[in-house]
Amino acid sequence: PEMPPLPPPAQRTERQQRGILLRTLALAAVALAMLQEDCVSCWNYCGGYQGIAAALKRPIGIFRGLASRGLESAPDFTSRASWSVGKVAAASGLVGTAVLLTMRRPRRRRAGERPPCCPRGALGPAAATSSGRGRMETLPDGSQAYVVGDGQRAVVVASDIFGIHTGRNKEICDELANEGYLVVMSDFFKGAYPDEGASPPWWKKLLQAPGLLAPISTPWSSVEDLLRQGVLPYLDSRGCAAGQVGLVGFCWGAWVVFKACAALPMAFACGASAHPSVSSMAALWGEDEGGILRAVRAPQLVLATKDEPESWKPGGTAETSLRATGGDVGHLFREFTSMSHGFVPHADVSDASNAAEVRRAMDYIKGFLGKHVARGPPKV
């Protein structure tokens, strides 16, 4: 039989063309930043093109912090030239990447392709609102965690895909500690997002972009090892009673909440999740979402937004699956119909309506933890 004709190549939309242009310009700007010290220094050193050098210094001075070092301290022209060649090569690689991005044809998502963690319409990362009143500590397995508070009851917090040093994550931990809990927010991404403090300059945010790959390259086995070898031994060393631990997760962290409650039923008394990405993460790792839900026995609080799939809203299949297999142990599903995915740690609370909804979500979380953590681990 004859082969069917090939479909015509996909045409880029205006929006796609704008996106490609922006990526190209961004990479070219980084390339210029790497070159700016070399070019300006070499031109001045050779005594020519001083006017061009002076003109270039001003517009690309904003990228000065991205250059690893200049050439002014080089002892002679030979060493300057060799260092310049290395940086020219690196910058050329970035420009080449930009060209390849420009040449790529857009394609439709294939069936079964890994989906993104967050749904369309989700909020991006907000700058850290507080450095927190807690401290970074090293856990028994060598990993890092933000720790605040004290007591025999504990809360383990799993952040969203933007890591523990963004938005209101530390502020949320401090608020939970005020309720009498020892709060541990573990860095499951193992330093992928460095702590740049509150309101870092935009170029530092740009340099953190590769950290977005960490959540989709952090399998459950890595998370479970960190919980078993780092978090739980640390809580035991601080005198937290077995089973007197609640879990709180946002976005990617909600997947951690459900997986941990399923795999470690005697360790965690309950779980609370806001704008969960359990469906997308289960699909990403080829997991059976229904199997995860069927294995959970601890009571769960789920705060969905307008962006979550219908299955994770009140009355959806996630709630019915939990109730069908785990019984009526106190599961609670609520929807925040005016809020976007990511709102609890990242919404702009200078807006009164956002602030009110964030406060309502935190009241749900604190009330749920207060009701279930004191009861001990669920019966299995």
Image (tube, helix red, strand yellow):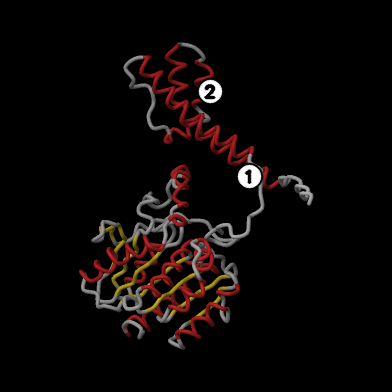
- Badge 2 density bin: few <14, some 14–19, many ≥20, Cα 10 Å: few
Residue 302, percent across and down? 49, 75
Foreground disc of the pair 1, 2 = 1
Number of numbered discs visible in the structure rendering? 2
Left or right, 23 with respect to 39, comes to right
Please, what secondary structure does the residue beneath circle 1 have? helix
| Residue 152 found in image quarter | bottom left
On screen, residue 230 above or below 36:
below
* Above or below: residue 296 compared with residue 9: below
Outermost residue toward the top? 47
For the point 43% across and 87% down, the residue is 329
Mark-to-mark CA distance, 1 and 2? 29 Å
User: Which kind of residue does numbered mark 2 sit on?
Assistant: Ala
Q: Residue at x 31, y 83 (%)?
A: 376
Q: Which disc number belongs to residue 19? A: 1
- On the rendered structure, is 17 left or right of 126? right
The residue carrying mark 2 is 55
Circle 2 — which element? helix
| Vertical relation: 290 (above or below) 64 | below
Q: Amino acid at mark 1?
A: Gly
Sequence-first disc among 1 and 2: 1
Tell me the residue at 40%/80% (across/down): 298
